Image (cartoon, rainbow, N blue to C red):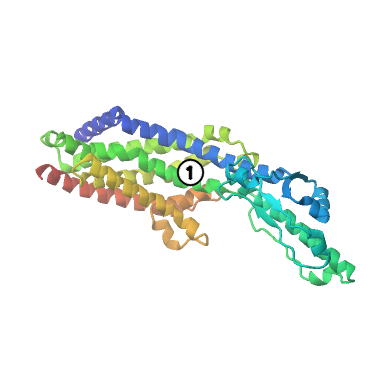
Amino acid sequence: MREILAIYSKEITDAIRDRRTLLTVLASSLLMVPLMLFVFSTIISQVESQAEDRVVVAVNMQEASTLENFILRQGYQIKAAPQDYEAKSSSKELAKPVLLIPKDFENDLAQAKKVDLEIAYDTSNRQAEMGVRPLRNLLNAFVQERAVADLSMRGVSPQLLQSVGIKERHISRPDERKVTITGMLPMFLIMAVVMGGMFAAIDSTAGERERGSLEPLMMNPLSGRQLAIGKTAAVASVSVLVSVLTVLSFFPAQLVIGNEGLRAEFQFGSKEAIAFLLILTPLACALASLQVALSLTCRSFKEANVRNQLLSMLVGFMPLFFLLNPGKEPAWLSWAPVMAQTQMMNQVLKGELVSLTSMAIAMLVSAVLVIASLSFVSKKMREVVMA
């Protein structure tokens, strides 16, 4: 036990001295969540501001008096589009889509001819693109009102065409919280844990192998199992530290949320923090042990870095399963590392109860990964030195 603690102390000291590890830990744990929440709240605020900004920019509005009257009655203002609206939309000077009205709009409409209205905007102009949907909804309302008026003038009751009404009834628990794009946060949390322990794992294995400091360490009366436990425990401690700091960063991160709706939905307290730590800690240990085992098979820091980047990409792609398959989660998902933790963290964000069975399965799978990795590293350690 004394030997394992000595190895653990050495590796922790080296990790603290390594600037790459220290910067990665601080950047991934303290900055990622506040930055993501700030970006999310900014995007939502931009979308809502476009919906609340009741201004229609149009070309040839004088050709459509009925449409103009309808838009004004809805509380909108009408502004004439600049002549070079295409160039200004491309350069992002014009932050609204432009409504293009054809000539003889009123005459064609009176003669029951089909009239096409166009909405012009540059697809690279994100602000203008966000205003397309509110403008389209406004025009659809005008079309519906016009159709009702035409039917009434011909003595046809509009209710004959709407004999079937459609309503929505939402089935949800009173205590269930909505989760918007913050559902992506578990993926960023897991990526922070992966990146936080990566350089510590590489430096303690492939880094020492490249520097030639692994051989003198093996000259001590140490077994491969003791080396494996000491090094893996040190890397796991760094990964767990990243997960703790990342979860704690949720509390100050809530202060940077500028959108009122998102702030009301995103409620993260001590209960949620404890649940997140119970979910992330076993996964952090499992990922750290995998990173140590993977790095030990490499002869240089660069090679280990490339392989660990591939592992990080694989881990990052796994939560995308929930975007590709938004239906009911299959039963085997509880046995899939990373995806099981993502599912449980999403449940916590929604205010749902996490099943103890799912928690126990996730811990069991993580423990199996740790044991398998330790066994591999124990056997591989002597072989690496003798090679």
Location of residue 75 with respect to 248 vertically, above or below: below
What's the residue at 33%, 36% (across, down)? 237
Amino acid type for the residue under numbered disc 1? Ala
Q: In which quarter of the image is residue 201?
A: top left
Residue 43 placement, left or right of 72:
left
For disc 1, the marked residue is 275
Which type of secondary structure does the marked residue at label 1 adopt?
A: helix
Location of residue 262 with respect to 339 vertically, above or below: above
Q: How crowded is mark 1: few (under 14 residues within 10 Å), some or many (20 or more)?
A: some
Residue 286 placement, left or right of 359:
left
| Quadrant showing the N terminus | top left
Q: In which quarter of the image is residue 87?
A: top right
User: Is 353 in front, or is 347?
Assistant: 347
User: Is 226 in front, or is 194?
Assistant: 194
What's the residue at 24%, 33% (across, down)? 5
What's the residue at 45%, 54% (across, down)? 320
Residue 225 position in % (x across, y down): 19, 43
Residue 69 placement, left or right of 133:
right
Residue 163 position in % (x across, y down): 79, 71
| Quadrant showing the C terminus | top left
Residue 292 position in % (x across, y down): 26, 43
User: Is 147 in front, or is 364?
Assistant: 147
Decide if residue 286 is in sight here: no
